[in-house]
Image: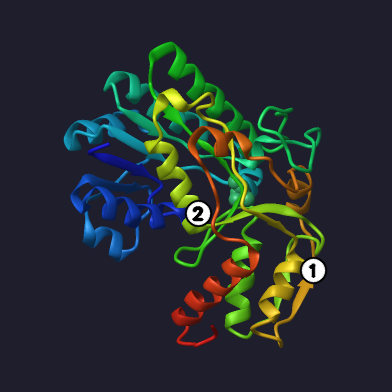
Amino acid sequence: MKRILVTGAAGQIGSDLIVYLRDRYGKNNVLATDIREPAEEIKEEGPWEKLDVTDASNINRIIEDYEIDTIYHLAAILSARGEKNPQLAFKVNILGTYNVLEAGVKYELERIIIPSSIAVFGPETPKDNTPNETVLRPTTMYGITKVTGELLGNYYFKRFGVDVRGVRFPGIISWKTLPGGGTTDYAVEMFYYAVQGKKYTCFLREDTYLPMMYMPDAIRALVELAEAPVEKLKHHTDFNLSAMSFCPKELEKEIKKYIPEFEVEYKPDYRQEIADSWPRSIDDSAAREEWGWKPQYDLPLMVKDMLHNIGKKFGKDIV
Ligand code: SER
């Protein structure tokens, strides 16, 4: 892992991952790519290129130009946006992943990391403490593309020896870059409304439990899995990951400990059906056993850190 390409670097996870990887492996060894312009900080501190992951020739050109040996493939259309435009989700998520895997074979890449999601599960999956090995019958296009990505990654490992790895992320909460197009996005939006003294209208029911994770844990999970010795891994592309589970009402209450006047109204929309098809909590014992995964942030710690950082963004000293 000497020369790393990150796709989707302008997104919620990408913009935090780029900073972490550049710190760890050297600024010039981590190439940020995205179809959109990333933040100034990302462009100024290291190399960046515009990249549409559905364009295989551009992926290949970039790998050659920068002598890439590792890819973190984050570019994807998330669940809610995917239901608005399933054709686009299919194209970006399936073709993008296929192009990256094929590049893995062509250039004998050392490692490819492709995040998966709790969206691989569906209404028939056990909802509580969902096991790693269980029913994968998602009802969203996003979920279908993520199951496909997991299966393809395992296939490319067995068939072509490409070392593909991935975790099933829960909803990711962070303050640096807003998420876009996900069903779990409410858990980030709520903070921005609270800090700005605005009432928030939540698009999920107040009792909708979903698995969630704070960004520092998510980044550490990706990099720890990427660096784990391959002989320790029985799974490759499909590790369940867990950190915390809560419902919107619990998040509202935790935020109110710091901002008591904060108000939330609940008006579920089409995203409720997506959330209802996903687990409430996750069993991540495979990740704990095979590469020592352990989360550090629970709900109270996450809320405190989020309010501190988003408060600072708006010049407010909340925590
Ligand atoms: N956070 C994602 C979404 O809501 C789940 O992977 O789509």
Residue type for callout 2: Asp
Which quadrant does the C terminus fall into?
A: bottom right
Q: Viewed as shown, does residue 159 lie left or right of 262? A: left
Kindly identify which numbered label has been placed on residue 217: 2
Residue type for callout 1: Tyr
Q: Viewed as shown, does residue 20 lie left or right of 304? A: left
Mark 1 falls on what kind of element? strand
Q: Residues within 10 Å of mark 1 (few under 14, many from 20)?
A: some
Tell me the residue at 57%/46% (across/down): 78
Q: Which residue is tagged 1?
A: 266
The image position of residue 16, as x and y in percent, is 40, 57
The image position of residue 312, as x and y in percent, is 45, 81
Q: Is residue 267 visible?
A: yes
Whether the residue under disc 2 has CB within 8 Å of ligand 1: no
Q: Nearer the viewer, residue 255 or 286?
A: 286
Which quadrant does the N terminus fall into?
A: top left
Q: Is residue 89 visible?
A: no
